[in-house]
Amino acid sequence: MGKRVVDSISKIKNALRAKHNYADLESNSVVYSVCSILKQEGYIKDVKKLENSGNKNIIRVSLKYADERKKEPIIKSIKLISKPSRKVYVQSDDIKPVMNGLGVGIISTSKGVMTFDEAMKNNVGGELICEVF
């Protein structure tokens, strides 16, 4: 996991705090996979690749709010676990549910980026990316 994932998660957090409707992120395959999982789990509205972004891969993440008028975000907490300076790896037996199953964890495995639940079902471990609640 690299700097782009860290930057992307920070941009999403900042956009939610500022009550923006979307965040534009520099993307790679891991960033896109993480955002796709967030969409699949219902934490964001949509993820789209922007066409006219020059030679950079830019994706637009449409943020989701529980109350559109008050801009109360669906994501209460998004906690980065691995960082470029400190990688955190786990085996499949050591993966714990996020907030007793109320949240979702995202892990990068040899079989791709997936949720903690999928990693436990597939019996694979890997690098912990983040926990979302």
Image (cartoon, grey):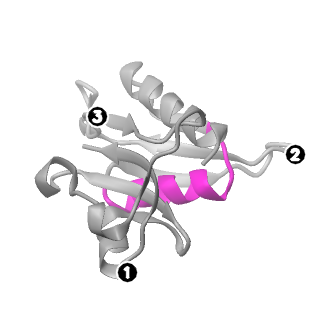
For mark 3, what is the residue? 77
Q: Residue at x 56, y 71 (%)?
A: 110
Q: Quadrant of residue 38?
A: bottom left
| Residue numbers of the magenta segment | 25-42
Determine whether, in the image, residue 108 is placed left or right of residue 78.
right
Asked which secondary structure carries label 3, the reply is: loop
Other residues around mark 3 within 10 Å, as few (<14) / some (14–19) / many (≥20): few
Q: Is residue 16 magenta?
A: no
For mark 1, what is the residue? 122
Disc 2 marks a residue whose amino acid type is Asn
For mark 2, what is the residue? 55
Determine whether, in the image, residue 25 is placed left or right of residue 123.
right
Q: How many marks?
A: 3
Disc 3 marks a residue whose amino acid type is Ser
Q: Quadrant of the C terminus?
A: top left
Is 111 situated above or below 26? below
